Image (cartoon, helix red, strand yellow):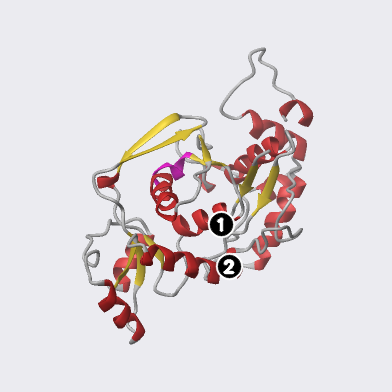
């Protein structure tokens, strides 16, 4: 038995690329008494809304995707909204600080904003600060982020169900922010904590997360917890071989619904995107796809 999760951010309409990721998690969750979790990653307080969350749940269910645990169903690992788990992230960040695997960073807010937009790496300026002095500065009210200390000169390896062996050089990874100056956890940290505490052992997501996975593997190791298996799916592309976006036409599930597409047709099409059956069969029942 395995535990999987689909973890969208409620910051807009559900994109067909998101739906395809959810679909593969769903299909595998229907086999061998596996379990699927819906987790809402709503730490982007400016853009996340409960209305988008409700729309997300409605669109997923229209498309024929359901789950066993989530904010609408509860479960033994509740709560399933990241905004309701802040104390847990604080606890785990403190563990990393105590073990020497994380540190306070006092660099400017401009640098923090720039990194969140993937415009630059981090110089490591605060990496060697004395931890006692850093704590004293924080206690006096000085603003700081918390960064994870990427180990130097290490080869990061992980197995991917789709890509087999993936290798990264740790020297090419800068120290990521794991807790912002506002106290809100960053993506690479919160997903590790949640996947560990929710006993997730298979993570299926888009290949745009490959470099994130290298950082996350190092955080799993630093926390001393089990690393899940990963499967990184190819991206949904437009006819011009660029990542699917609005310029290609309808991209949200709600648009397909409004335009009269059958949920079964969208389900079948997305399930077959990126591969083909040996007998060239193009229409499958849900049971066959499972």
Query: Viewer-proximal residue, 54 or 154?
Result: 154
Mark 2 and mark 1 residues within 8 Å of each other at the beta carbon: yes
Q: From the image, tell me which residue sits under label 1.
A: 194
Find numbered disc 1 in the image and state the secondary structure of the residue it sits on: helix
Examine the rendered structure and indicate whether residue 82 appears above or below residue 225.
Answer: below
Across and down, in percent, residue 24 comes to 64, 37
Residue stretch in magenta: 207-211
Residue at figure coordinates x 56%, y 52% from the top left: 195
Across and down, in percent, residue 209 comes to 45, 45
Residue at figure coordinates x 61%, y 54% from the top left: 198
**Is residue 186 left or right of 13 when viewed as pictured?**
left
Q: From the image, tell me which residue sits under label 2.
A: 85
| The quadrant where residue 54 appears | bottom right
Residue 112 is a magenta residue: no
Give the mark nearer the N terminus: 2 vs 1: 2
Number of numbered discs overlaid on the protein picture: 2
Examine the rendered structure and indicate whether residue 139 appears above or below residue 195.
Answer: below
Across and down, in percent, residue 1 comes to 68, 38
Determine crowd level at label 1: few under 14, some 14-19, many 20+ residues with C-alpha closer than 10 A: some
């Amino acid at each position: 038995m395995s535990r999987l999760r689909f973890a969208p951010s409620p910051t807009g309409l559900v994109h067909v690329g998101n739906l395809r990721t959810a679909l593969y998690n769903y299909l595998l969750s229907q086999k061998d008494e596996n379990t699927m979790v819906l987790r809402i990653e709503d730490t982007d307080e400016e853009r996340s809304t409960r209305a988008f969350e409700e729309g997300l749940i409605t669109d997923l269910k229209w498309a024929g995707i359901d789950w066993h645990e989530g904010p609408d169903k509860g479960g033994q690992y509740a709560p399933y909204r990241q905004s309701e788990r802040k104390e847990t992230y604080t606890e785990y960040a403190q563990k990393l600080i105590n073990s020497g695997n994380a540190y306070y960073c006092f660099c400017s807010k401009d640098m923090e904003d720039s990194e969140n937009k993937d415009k630059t790496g981090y110089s490591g300026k605060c990496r060697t600060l004395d931890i006692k002095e850093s704590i004293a500065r924080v206690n006096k009210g000085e603003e700081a982020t918390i960064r994870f200390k990427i180990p130097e000169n290490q080869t990061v390896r992980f197995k991917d169900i789709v890509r087999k062996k993936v290798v990264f050089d740790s020297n090419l990874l800068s120290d990521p922010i794991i807790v912002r100056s506002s106290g809100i956890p960053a993506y690479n940290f919160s997903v590790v904590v949640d996947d560990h505490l929710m006993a997730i052992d298979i993570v299926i997501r888009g290949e745009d997360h490959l470099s994130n996975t290298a950082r996350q593997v190092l955080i799993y190791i630093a926390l001393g917890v089990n690393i899940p298996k990963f499967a990184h799916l190819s991206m949904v592309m437009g006819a011009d071989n660029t990542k699917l976006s609005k310029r290609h036409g309808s991209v949200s599930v709600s648009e397909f619904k409004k335009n009269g597409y059958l949920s079964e047709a969208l389900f079948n099409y997305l399930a077959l995107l990126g591969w083909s059956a040996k007998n060239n069969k193009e229409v499958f029942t849900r049971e066959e796809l499972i």
